[in-house]
Amino acid sequence: MATIEKLIVDHYRIPLPVVLSDSTHGDMHDFALVTVRIIDSDGAEGLGYGYTVGNIGGDAMRSLIDKDLRHAVVGEDASRIEQLWEKMWWYVHYVGRGGLASFAMAAIDVALWDLKAKKADEPLWRFLGGHDTRVQAYAGGIDLQFTIDALLEQADGFRADNFSAIKMKIGRKVLSEDVERVTAMRRHLGDDFPLLADANMGWSVDHAVRAARSVRDLNLVWIEEPTIPDDIEGHAVIAREGGVPIATGENFHTIYEFKNMIDRGGVSFPEPDLVTLGGITPWLKVARYAEASNLPVTSHGVHDLHVHLLAAVPNSSFLEIHGFGLNDYIEHPLTLDDQGYAHAPMRTGHGISFDFDALESLRA
């Protein structure tokens, strides 16, 4: 039995290459990267990491790991990940039950899975089940304030980079502007090119129904987060009356939120983000519940990790890829083949290595 001997946590502030915007978060100039390295009594090391948008809460996430969660895991058997996840959950339950606690737990959980897969000499996607190494990717545009010309120019750049699906932002203050922008993208991309749209929780239920009906003839793969994640019944109304498939879940922090949304019929594409949900351990549970409900699962952010998870399960759909600038600090950034598919790497563990020397100047 190898026990956890050391936990190293660091926090970096990563500048975005361009200012990004959506209907909820406004303009975004940077984000927080929090890394966790776990070293066991055999000297083996696992790497985990997470993020926060706009660097909000990044230092709190680092502190929660460093001051509290380390006491739940150091000295414990590194291979008993389910037990360690539950121990962390109850260790911070009084101030947690999701939220920032899930972000902090996720970084540790990823490091534990990376460590375990490395010690098994397996790539993570195969260690977790190994369904299909190929996953269709889409470019996640964060472009609500782009002009239509800039939006179309960005789409051309995505296609030049081999993307075979694109997501755009919607949720402007005037519905006719959203309709105009989606129509322009559909005409530019052609009738059958997979086009997705994300409202980032910006609408009321009634507005979301009107918006969905206004674009339902434009063959969207889905409308994402049409209203606040807390309104389960509202999502069910939008899904039932809007006429467009719904994706949601990136702002869910527990498996129970996914169960309730799926059971109420409020989602067509459950969208767990391992960082916001608490790690790989709960992500897999959501994927399996979606499969049992005859639904595909998709992802949000951290594509270098999510490619493994989607490659591991039989009900995967799209992998979201964001250009957040993290590629500059990763030794083997994810690439696409000429059909627009990402391939989970064959390196042991998740196969991600950070250039910590380059990150040093960005330490928060």
Image: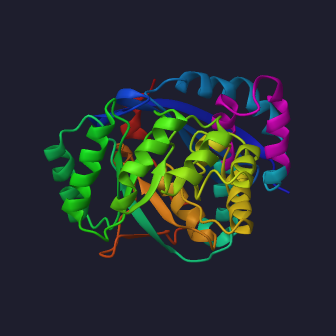
- Along the line of sight, the residue nearer the viewer: 248 or 360: 248
Q: Is residue 333 left or right of residue 143?
A: right
Q: Residue at 82% across / 24% down in the picture? A: 94
Magenta residues, start to end: 83-109
Which of the image's four quarters has the N terminus?
Answer: bottom right
Question: Does the rendering let one see residue 74?
Answer: no
Q: Residue at 55% across / 23% down in the picture? A: 57
Q: Position of residue 96 (x, y in %)?
A: 75, 28
- Along the line of sight, the residue nearer the viewer: 24 or 54: 24
Query: Does 14 appear in magenta?
Result: no
Main secondary structure type of the part rendered in magenta:
helix
Q: Residue at 64% across / 65% down in the picture? A: 295
Q: Position of residue 98 (x, y in %)?
A: 71, 34
Looking at the image, how many numbered discs can be counted on the residues? 0
Q: Position of residue 279 (x, y in %)?
A: 66, 47
Q: Position of residue 110 (x, y in %)?
A: 64, 50
